Amino acid sequence: MGDLVVERESSASVAELWQVATDWDGHGRFFPGTSVHALSSEPAVGQRVSATTRIGPLRLHDAMLVTRWEPPGESGRCEVRKIGRVLGGRTVLEVEPVGSGARLRWTTDVGPAPRLPRRVLAPVSKLIAGPLYRRVVRGMVAEAEHG
């Protein structure tokens, strides 16, 4: 779909935003109809994450691999690659200080696993994904701010 970037500033700290954004098991609170589970307890490069989204009787499995893990000192960055048969692409989560709070930046390029269909469907994917990821980032920021 090409990179879709969603950013939101927050009164929460970098550490608070990082905690919410990288709590894989908690992502189901933000993605409708989705349950997410980290397949290992330690967040690090190589960690696998599994998500299942239910739409009526259909189930979409999304297998992911953490390919970069830089917890925040001043800022933090995590990259996740989609490794399943159905979905491909990558997501980058960045948290950085802004004023007395922090900013969460979610960059994603996700779509059908085969690259050609992903490129062909890019305009439609962005129309669907934009509102979803804005909702996700807004929810994560709200949770970081209010617990």
Image: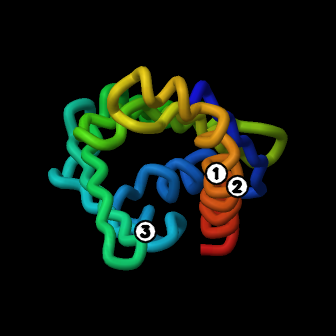
Q: Amino acid at mark 1?
A: Ile
Residue 75 placement (x, y as % from top left): 58, 32
The first of marks 3 and 1 along the sequence is: 3
Q: Amino acid at mark 3?
A: Gly
- On-image quarter of the N terminus: top right
Residue in the picture at 44% in, 62% down: 27
- Residue under label 1: 128
Give the structural element (helix, strand or loop) at label 2: helix
On the rendered structure, is 132 left or right of 100? left
Tag in front: 2 or 1: 1
CA neighbours of label 3 inside 10 A, class few (<14), some (14 to 19), many (20+):
some
Front one among 139 and 87: 87
- Residue under label 3: 28
Pointer 2 and pointer 1: residues touching (CB < 8 Å)? yes
The first of marks 2 and 3 along the sequence is: 3
Tag in front: 2 or 3: 2
Disc sitting over residue 75 in the figure? none
Q: Is residue 140 visible?
A: yes
Cα–Cα span, label 2 and label 1: 6 Å
- Residue under label 2: 131
Q: Is residue 76 visible?
A: no
Q: Amino acid at mark 2?
A: Pro
Front one among 48 and 128: 128
Cα–Cα span, label 2 and label 3: 16 Å
Residue 138's quadrant in the figure?
Answer: bottom right
Residue 57 placement (x, y as % from top left): 32, 77
Residue in the picture at 51% in, 58% down: 20
Residue 90 versus residue 36 in the image, above or below: above
